[in-house]
Amino acid sequence: MRNEVARRMQESACAAAEPPLRWEPRCRQQLRHLQDGAGIAARLPPRLEGRWVSTGCEVRPGPEFLTRSYLFYANRLFKAYQFYYWDPSCHDPSYSLVIKGKLRLRQASWITRGATEADYHLHKVGIVFHSQKAMREVATWINQTSSEGCSGFLPPGRTWAPGALYELLSAKTERDCTAALGFAMHELSLVRVEKHYQPLLQPQQSGSRLVEELYLGDIHTEWLERLHYRPTGYQRPMQSAVHHVHPCPACGIIYRADEHHPPILPVRAQLPMQLSGSWVSTHCEVRPAVLFLTRYFIFHGNNHTWEGYYYHYSDPLCKEPTFTIYASGHYTQGIPSSKVRGGTELAFKVTQARVTPMDQVTVMMLNSSEPGSCGLTSSWSAGVEQDITPTNGCLALGIKLPHTEYELFKTEQDMKDRSLLYIGERPTDGSSPDSPDKRPTSYQAPLIQCAGALEEFSNYVSLKYLGKKDTNGNEALKPLPVAFLLFIALLFLRWD
């Protein structure tokens, strides 16, 4: 059975690597790929044995910049490293945490579909400082905010000793001084492992390589809530130290690190914010409160307007659509963030929105909503889009129009020189960042640029159309936009 699953995953990966038989916009190709499951398989319960590492510098709410390296043993024990930094490139280390404990996988989650719930117990947590500044800052936090047993954790004026390990938590002595750091390992209470195959990049090679990703529970966006929050979403995945994407220079650096030798990643050049073009999700995304979705954005830099499509699903592979939201508006000129180094602050005005219910449950919910609160009363039907601008949004879906959101953006290039766009993480409580003080300090999963500003022939991508069959059982094709037909005509004229 296991060999059969592996064979199917490899076939899916090879099929994804093959060029399409007909011309198709890259954005639509990616959305189709995601809706087809993206060749992903998940095992329940997951196998955790082995080492898992970050694939780059991670940003947690705060902001906190860190990398992670977790080792799980067959006897359920684990040893985890968390390396913290002063900078968004994870080049200048501040301190490292060594976390030891035991993890027990339980049942499949009743809340987050596709996840496994787990219990964990911490045995020890130690800290190693990498500078006098880090030691002084952390000692001040602990001495000021911790209980009596931690008030003298580090006496004022203590000289930094490189490599010295200080105990923050001990199950034997029942001492716990971690709260001042906002530290908790609740991420271990929600676990998912995904597998897929990455096509080999070299022209002379064929086939694919296995990639394994470990998704652990998300971190609450509010600092005061993170110590008690039980995750329902995920944070950025770690990858198996053996089966990871290639190339991944950070993987090897982090794998070889320990608390005395933290990983020092190369400084990343800060790219100018160039939003123009189209951006699409790289995988099926999960948000807290059990929302599975993919996103597709078009930014028009000439007039600072934007369009966004949010495709919602009921399953973790984004195969079972529930509803789609289209929103549009305009955005302000970005300014460098004073709080999150490397980020850009913008304000987005949402002025219009449309909703397309895709299943009968959503149709029933919308038709049961209060009259005048979400489109035309009792007029919703599956697959039919309706404008909710005249009713100032949709109360049932939590959409209010018009409204402004205060955002945080960042652009990067991955190791294949593809442009990535990071948009601010949504508040964990489901609210909107509708005031400057609620502006995000961390990011959602990245979007990948699928079209530049000059490639936007047709903006609308309808997922009702993806995978649809005609009367003969063949996949139906959407009529080509007029702009594209004109473009093809011009190409023929040029060849003449």
Image (cartoon, rainbow, N blue to C red):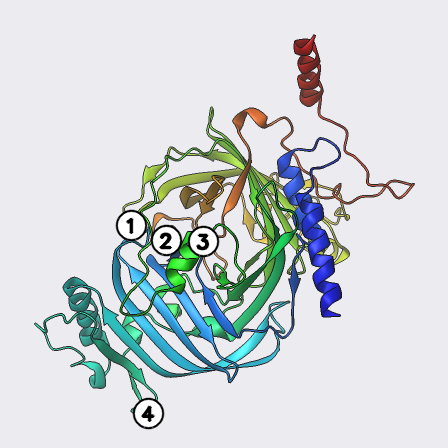
Q: Which quarter of the figure is the N terminus placed in? A: bottom right
Left/right of residue 476 with respect to residue 426 in the rendered view? right
Q: Secondary structure at mark 3?
A: loop
Q: Position of residue 424 (x, y in %)?
A: 43, 49
> Label 3, label 2: how many angstroms apart (C-alpha)?
7 Å
> Label 4, label 2: how many angstroms apart (C-alpha)?
36 Å
> Label 4, label 1: how many angstroms apart (C-alpha)?
39 Å
Residue to which mark 2 is pinned:
441
Residue to which mark 4 is pinned:
172
> Label 2, label 1: how many angstroms apart (C-alpha)?
8 Å
* Front disc: 4 or 2: 4
Q: Is residue 157 visible?
A: yes
Residue to which mark 3 is pinned:
425
- Residue that sits furthest to the right in the current view: 472
Sequence order check, earlier mark of 2 and 1: 1
Q: Secondary structure at mark 1?
A: loop
Cβ atoms under marks 3 and 2 closer than 8 Å: yes
